[in-house]
Image: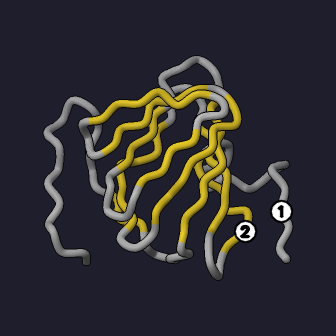
Amino acid sequence: MQKASLDNPGYRNGTWGPAYLIQGPSSDMGVLLLNPGDAMPNHIHEHCDESFVVLEGSCTLWMDGVERHTMTVHDVFRANPREMHYLVNESDKPFRCLFIKSPASPGDTITIPWVPGEPVPTLTDEPA
């Protein structure tokens, strides 16, 4: 058994960003905090899906650069492998969600530069 806490999780960017709580072997779990104006860069995962459970606030989730979703408390979303996803906090309050990557795939994240308003990047059919 593994145990973790949402209290002081050690965010990647100090006061915001992702923070892993439990990693491997079958899944990775963490929490993402985005303060107003913060964004998680557009990215894909080659081999794992990533699910989000909203704990606090609201956020805009862009899927594949064309689908815009508003994430609010108690919503659950999942990005399949190779499905681009970009999260941005356009509200005036912090956003926090639990994320689960399955299967655990360290090094599986590929950042694909893109923000809303830019042309949508085209992915090749072949995984890297």
Where residue 49 appears, as percent x and y from the top left, is 46, 63
Count of picture labels: 2
What residue is rendered at 63% in x and 68% in y? 28
What residue is rendered at 40% in x and 48% in y? 41
- How crowded pointer 2 is (Cα within 10 Å; few <14, some 14-19, many 20+) is rated as some
Q: Nearer the viewer, residue 111 or 44?
A: 44
In the rendered structure, find residue 22 and report the number of the disc placed on it. 2
Q: Secondary structure at mark 2?
A: strand
CB atoms of marks 2 and 1 within 8 Å? yes
C-alpha distance separating marks 2 and 1: 7 Å
* Above or below 2: residue 18: above
Left or right side of 58 for 20: right
Which residue is label 1 attached to?
Answer: 4
Identity, as a three-letter code, of the amino acid under mark 1: Ala
* Above or below 84: residue 82: below
* Above or below 31: residue 103: below
Q: Nearer the viewer, residue 38 or 96?
A: 96
In the rendered structure, find residue 18 and report the number of the disc placed on it. none
Identity, as a three-letter code, of the amino acid under mark 2: Ile
Where residue 112 appears, as percent x and y from the top left, is 28, 55
Q: Residue furthest top?
A: 92
Where residue 118 appears, as percent x and y from the top left, is 18, 35
What residue is rendered at 39% in x and 43% in y? 86
What residue is rendered at 17% in x and 50% in y? 121
Left or right side of 21 for 7: right
| Mark 2 vs 1, N-terminal side | 1
Left or right side of 121 for 53: right
Where residue 5 appears, as percent x and y from the top left, is 84, 56
Q: Nearer the viewer, residue 31 or 101?
A: 101
Task: Report the quarter where the N terminus lies.
Answer: bottom right
